[in-house]
Image (cartoon, rainbow, N blue to C red):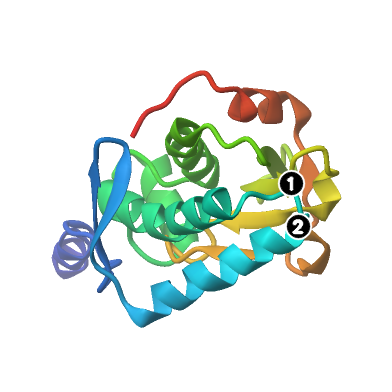
Amino acid sequence: MKKLSLFLIILLSGCSVKYKTVVKIENKEIKPIKITKKEQKKIKKLYLMLLNLDKTVDKKEAYSLSKIAVLYPIHLAKKYCLVYPPNFHNFLVNINLRKKGLCYQWVEDMMNFIRCKKFKTLVFHWGVANRGKLNEHNVIVVTAKNKPFKSGIILDAWRNSGNLYFNYLKEEKKYKFMEWKQKSKIISSSYGCIP
């Protein structure tokens, strides 16, 4: 039993999710210090998907959001002292061995940063699957302004432990997301900007 306890203490004493990409937050801006080609490709792919939402989407906004959505979760993974897999990290949060990292906390923290940008052509919604159940899952869904929730793109930083998962909502196979309208009003407001 002592060996098992010692093993668990060693296992849980540090962060297990590591990234080659290094980011710094300075003056409410993301400053990539070192960025891998994988993240560069993800930024470009998300950028093109955002532009594809509607012709009214501003190119600068699409690029800015792409950069934030891919890189800010890497910052949060370090801040949360993230361990893998996500469900195990949830367990650690629930027994108070980690402070944050549940899916709804990813949504809140990402939106607190995104709000700083005051996007005008992109709108953010709170997506939820299995609301109120043990396997509830929360994400950000971004749409073009005045477009329906179902036309949006999922931004899910929790699913792959800070490695952003994104996809068109209509192509999502794992979860059936619905808009949580009360939460959408909160995250889409311009109130609160916390880097």
In this orientation, which residue lies closer to the viewer: 104 or 13? 104
Residue 118: image tag: none
Q: Quadrant of residue 104?
A: top right
Say which residue label 2 marks: 53
Name the amino acid type tagged 1: Ala
In this orientation, which residue lies closer to the viewer: 56 or 40? 56
Secondary structure beneath disc 1? strand
In this orientation, which residue lies closer to the viewer: 9 or 125? 125
Instruction: Give x and y (percent) for residue 136.
Output: 67, 46
Q: Is residue 135 left or right of residue 54?
A: left
Instruction: Give x and y (percent) for residue 156.
Output: 57, 56
Residue at the image point whose x is 44% and y is 52% from the top: 68
Q: Is residue 61 left or right of residue 99?
A: right
Residue at the image point whose x is 67% and y is 28% from the top: 183
Say which residue label 1 marks: 144
Instruction: Give x and y (percent) for residue 30.
Output: 31, 49
Secondary structure beneath disc 2? helix
Residue at the image point whose x is 74% and y is 48% from the top: 56
Q: Quadrant of residue 47?
A: bottom right
Looking at this rendering, what residue extends furthest in the top direction?
191
- Is residue 50 visible in the rendered image? The answer is yes
**Image height of 158 relative to 96, above or below:** below
Distance from the alpha carbon under mark 1 to that under mark 2: 6 Å
Q: Which quadrant holds the C terminus?
A: top left
Q: Quadrant of residue 127?
A: top right
